Image (cartoon, rainbow, N blue to C red):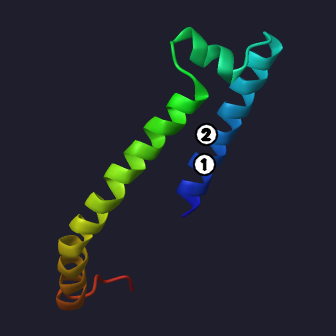
Amino acid sequence: MLRFLAATFKILLASLITGAGLSFFDLSSAELLARIGMTPEEVWAYLVRAVNWAVPNILLGSLIVVPVWLLTYIFLPPRGDA
């Protein structure tokens, strides 16, 4: 858990520094998107399409993965932590 929090903090810090640098050069996210030929609405539409595709597939896969994991967790002997 500590590694996850440390990685999250590093990503947030790098994003903050990068955002401050871009702001210093007076660049906005809308301008950067316009330079690559996209609008914020198009990005949102792609994000919605991705979520609409991913959620049913995640649920379908979990119908197999979760029971297999549960059976493995129940029937494998515990690891020796002591």
- Image: 48 above or below 17: below
In this picture, residue 60 sits left or right of residue 1: left
Kind of residue at disc 2: Ile
User: Disc 2 on helix, strand or loop?
Assistant: helix
User: Disc 1 on helix, strand or loop?
Assistant: helix
Query: Which residue is rendered at x = 67% and y = 14% of the image?
Result: 31
In this picture, residue 46 sits left or right of residue 54: right
User: What residue is pinned by disc 2?
Assistant: 11
How many numbered callouts?
Answer: 2
Residue 54, x across and y down, in percent: 33, 53
Asked if the residues shown at circle 2 and circle 1 are in contact, with their CB atoms under 8 angstroms apart, the answer is: yes
For residue 34, which quarter of the picture?
Answer: top right
In this picture, residue 30 sits left or right of residue 39: right
- Image: 78 above or below 54: below
Residue 19, x across and y down, in percent: 73, 26
Which of the pair 7/60 is nearer the observer? 60
Residue 2, x across and y down, in percent: 58, 60
Kind of residue at disc 1: Thr
Q: Which mark is residue 8?
A: 1
Q: Which mark is residue 59?
A: none
